[in-house]
Image: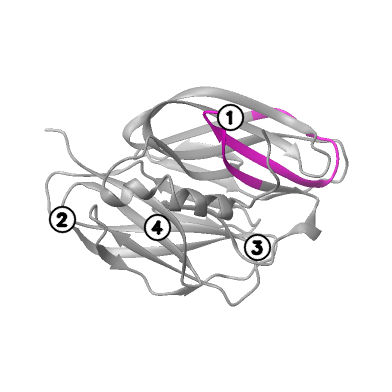
Amino acid sequence: MRRGPLSLAGMIMVIAAGALAPALAGAQPDAALLGLAVVDSIGRDAHGDLVLNGIRHVSRTAAFPYTENLSVYTRWGGSGEHDIGISVWNMDTDETVCEEEETVRFSDGGITSYAHTFINAKFPRRGTYDVETTLDGDLAAEYSLFVDADDSFPDTPELVLSVPARSGALDLADAVSVSGIPEGFTFNGFPALTSFALVTLWFSGAAGHVQSMEILDPSGVPIATSRPRPIPADTGKIVPVTESFPHVALPVRGTYTAVLYLDGEDVFEYPLPVRRAAR
């Protein structure tokens, strides 16, 4: 059953406070949504890590009905077999553009990436469309897609995605890509010393907002913290902010946690699985 419109950031906050809580103690929840985004294409780099191209919240067209191939990426933590549903509908008229449900086997104790592409999705009119994902029939999160609806952009930065990655970039056409997204970290032994980056994407918003991040070990003890960084003000666009963590000591294997703060408030937490390499 559909609910009223909720922002992705609002849903993420619910997930972080509830379903992700076991990750702080080193346990994996049965299943939890870690990310949702509309993208142009999805691939793998030479290392086998994920690449997301053309991440967006906005579609523009000169005429309606408007048709496009719409790819929706979701990122999950947990294990077991689950039904993932994705639907797109108009928030003003309740018209359904497309919908799909599929049973997916999650990677035990790791990260599972799932995407579905709707071929020739038809948008009958301008407006704000809701991209909704469900987990086993329950609402997991919603993501607004603005189709020629520039008057509906939010004033406060809204979280789009935050992931470990090698890079996040904005090109001259304002297309955002994130490259080198791993599904976990593997080391030959512990303690391990490593350097990595976390890429966070924000949509729209006025100036004056800052983000910072913190890394917790499997017992919940902070082991690395970033300084507050301003979020670029760019109404109607997605902007990437990259936090680098050089020379971080990981004492043990297990589930570490990345904590994201917006203006000093904890808005999202997600697991960073750290494993020992197979011998």
Camera-side mark, 1 or 4: 1
Whole-number angstrom distance, CA of label 4 to CA of label 2:
20 Å
- Which residue position holds label 4? 198
Whole-number angstrom distance, CA of label 1 to CA of label 4:
27 Å
Instruction: Locate residue 248 relative to residue 231 in the image: left or right.
Output: left
Identify the amino acid type marked 4: Leu
Where is the N terminus found, in terms of image quarters? top right
Earlier-in-chain disc, 3 versus 4:
4
Identify the amino acid type marked 3: Ser
Classify 67 as above or below 223: above
Identify the amino acid type marked 2: Pro
Element assignment for label 1: strand
Whole-number angstrom distance, CA of label 3 to CA of label 4:
20 Å
Identify the amino acid type marked 1: Gly
Image x and y of residue 88, in percent: 70, 36
Q: In the displayed orientation, state which residue is furthest to the bottom.
A: 208
Image x and y of residue 231, in percent: 54, 70
Earlier-in-chain disc, 2 versus 3:
3
Earlier-in-chain disc, 3 versus 1:
1
Instruction: Locate residue 76 relative to residue 248 in the image: left or right.
Output: right
